[in-house]
Amino acid sequence: MSIVKRNNGSLLPANPRTLFDDFFSRELFNWGNNNFSSTLTTLPSVNIRENTENFEVELAAPGMEKQDFEITLEGNLLTISSSRKNQKEEKDENYIRREFSYQSFRRSIELAENVVDEEHIEAKYENGVLKLTIPKSEKAKKQAPRLIEVQ
């Protein structure tokens, strides 16, 4: 266990209960809550790469189906969202057991203005990873350096 400096300046909490509240309110294996939003819902990890021809976006979303995703481009804001509901029910003479779950997320990525060829964006979901290929417009692709002569 590490010592954490508190807002009141002390190294240990004035109230020992605060120490236990901090310990039990955190997820066991994710102490920093790195992949959680402010609402404590899981956000999938995203990798973004840029090369001379396009942008490549990879979003980790295992267990989803391709029809679970909604991808929109409004102006220069790319939004990837998903929602999925599961419901299961077992009936027996003595009991009824119902289980349900709901997963949803929304990630938005702001792209540079007038850089994307909107008509040729492709998305593919495979092995738990959603891959988007976002081609650059001809104007945005890097041109070879032009030699300017001095006169």
Image (cartoon, helix red, strand yellow):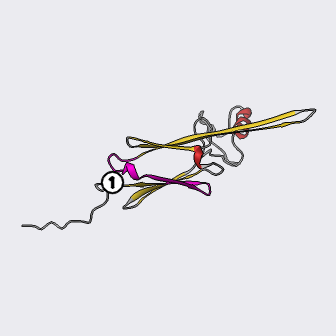
- Mark 1 element type: loop
Q: Quadrant of the C terminus?
A: bottom left
Say whether residue 134 is left or right of residue 100. left
Looking at this view, is 79 or 145 the one in front? 79
- Within the magenta stretch, is there residue 95? no
At horizontal 62% and vertical 44% (from top left) the residue drawn is 33
Kindly give the residue lying farthest to the right in the view shown: 94
At horizontal 31% and vertical 55% (from top left) the residue drawn is 140
Range of magenta residues: 111-132
Q: Amino acid at mark 1?
A: Ser
Tag 1 residue: 137
Kindly give the residue lying farthest to the left in the view shown: 151
- Within the magenta stretch, is there residue 128? yes
- Residue 129, percent from left and from top: 58, 55
Looking at this view, is 112 or 67 the one in front? 67
- Count of marks overlaid on the render: 1
- Residue 131, percent from left and from top: 52, 55
Q: Quadrant of residue 26?
A: top right
At horizontal 66% and vertical 47% (from top left) the residue drawn is 30
- Residue 146, percent from left and from top: 20, 65
138 relative to 41, above or below: below
Looking at this view, is 56 or 72 the one in front? 72
Local crowd size for mark 1, using a 10 Å CA cut-off: few (<14), some (14–19), many (≥20): some
- Residue 148, percent from left and from top: 15, 66
Say whether residue 84 is left or right of residue 52. right
Q: Quadrant of residue 88?
A: top right
At horizontal 38% and vertical 50% (from top left) the residue drawn is 119
